Image (cartoon, coloured by chain):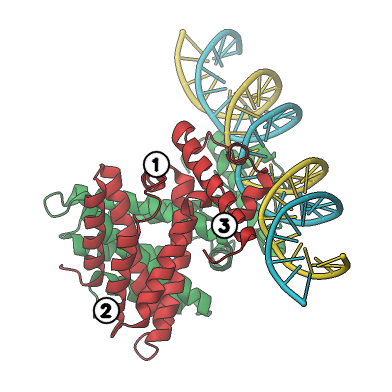
Chain colours: A green, B red, C yellow, D cyan
Amino acid sequence: MVEGRRERKKQLTRQALVDAAVRLFTERGFERTTVADIAEAADVSTRTFFLHFATKEDVLLADVTERVSGGAAAVLRDAASPAEALAAAADVMITDAWRGDLRTGAAGLRARLVVDNPAVRARLLQVGFAAQEGIAAALVAAFPDQLDEVDAAALVGALMGAVASAAVAALRRGDPPDAVRDAMRRAAALALAPGR
Amino acid sequence: MVEGRRERKKQLTRQALVDAAVRLFTERGFERTTVADIAEAADVSTRTFFLHFATKEDVLLADVTERVSGGAAAVLRDAASPAEALAAAADVMITDAWRGDLRTGAAGLRARLVVDNPAVRARLLQVGFAAQEGIAAALVAAFPDQLDEVDAAALVGALMGAVASAAVAALRRGDPPDAVRDAMRRAAALALAPGR
DNA sequence: TGCATTACTACATTGACTGTAGCAATATAG
DNA sequence: CTATATTGCTACAGTCAATGTAGTAATGCA
């Protein structure tokens, strides 16, 4: 919190928007809540919403992006091999996936919406893919003599694809959070060193 | 072509929309072309566009979906093991990915847009994920005693994620079609039985 | 010939998102 | 402390994708 008053107020507005969105999405559902509703509930103009979030979906997903790509990139820096780097990155991502927003209840809401709202799922896939590209680039930078861009993309894509699909499948089945996390870990292991 | 006149005219309208879309997207770009423009060029009402395609992006992607999921599901029926089934499915998908629409030039346009238009890429990810879920379900149905839903999802997700990521990476690098297809095949092999 | 279906149309509406110009609080330099 | 630059926010107007509805006319079918 070394920032000035201006930045502090900005974060306050942002948080008010997230809180309002989580509350309204929970009460009425995602589709039946308009961005204007959220802005109104947060007592800011509709335009302000889009100064903080690029899309309606991002109010739920923005922090995920930051943590996932940030954490994964950090891990890549001190790994001995591509395989080790990816395993570590997977671990960080899976562990982080649930942290944060437990306070606001955003994590559960997000999980629910990703499973049964196409727009939210689509946006998550989109930001997930972007994160993949970043991780793949970092991987190439870290091991330039062992991987080219396409191989790195394939490796990261396999890992993320397996984890994401397993997570959605487990959630769709109604697994509790712990079981979902286990499923994600198993999927990561399977993608990195398949048993069959 | 056993269909009646009504169905034939319908397909004519659909094709006119696709042709107009491909032409306009090529001339002006995706964003600078409105659905109204496409409908106007195809000489139908704007509403008619959405009776044929759910979204603006789908005018480019609709047939991909049909062929990919249809072809893959067919392969799953007569395979001896999950691994074999997935390998065959990957082969069908990769081979099919380029067929069709060579006439209209839609394939090249699509590849270009998937790489550098976020909306098109997002929509392709979305329909790809839906196709994955269908394939995973078929896999579980075919080998119910060897896989549960989550394992199947992880396997299919790893395969599709690797192939998709490698394809985009190769396209982004500027690889010619043949090289892209090779990259996809290599990614599939790597996802199914990684060398490292 | 009558009836049902359906592809298409015109029209109205919603809602996400963008561009622009201005205001007022905050930061910064002299 | 004052002048100036920055910037978070607002109001307002506009674009455009997407949906709902009711009607028409061609087609399919009895």
Residue B186 is drawn in which quadrant?
bottom left
Residue drawn 55% across the image and 63% down it: A110
CA neighbours of label 1 inside 10 A, class few (<14), some (14 to 19), many (20+): few
Which of the numbered marks, if any, corresponds to residue A175?
none
Dots 1 and 2 on the same chain: yes
Who is closer to the viewer here, A59 or B98?
A: B98
Query: Left or right of B168: which side holds D2?
Result: right
Q: Which residue is mark 2?
A: B84
Q: Position of residue A157 (x, y in %)?
A: 32, 60
Q: Looking at the figure, which quarter contains the C terminus of chain B?
A: bottom left
Give how far apart the Cα atoms at labels 3 and 1 are.
20 Å
SS of the residue under disc 2: helix
Q: Which residue is mark 1?
A: B116
CA neighbours of label 3 inside 10 A, class few (<14), some (14 to 19), many (20+): some
SS of the residue under disc 1: helix
Which of the numbered marks, if any, corresponds to residue A119?
3
Mark yes or no: residue A178 visible.
Answer: yes
The chain containing the residue under callout 2 comes to: B
Residue drawn 52% across the image and 52% down it: B58
Give how far apart the Cα atoms at labels 3 and 2 are.
34 Å
Amino acid type of the residue tagged 1 in the rendering:
Asp
> Nearer the viewer's eye, disc 3 or disc 2?
2
Who is closer to the viewer here, A76 or A157?
A: A157
Would you place residue A100 above or below residue B139 in this image? above
SS of the residue under disc 3: helix
Dots 3 and 2 on the same chain: no
Q: Position of residue C18 (x, y in %)?
A: 57, 33
Query: Left or right of B4: which side holds B107?
Result: left
Who is closer to the viewer here, B5 or B136?
A: B5
> Nearer the viewer's eye, disc 1 or disc 2?
2
Amino acid type of the residue tagged 3 in the rendering:
Ala
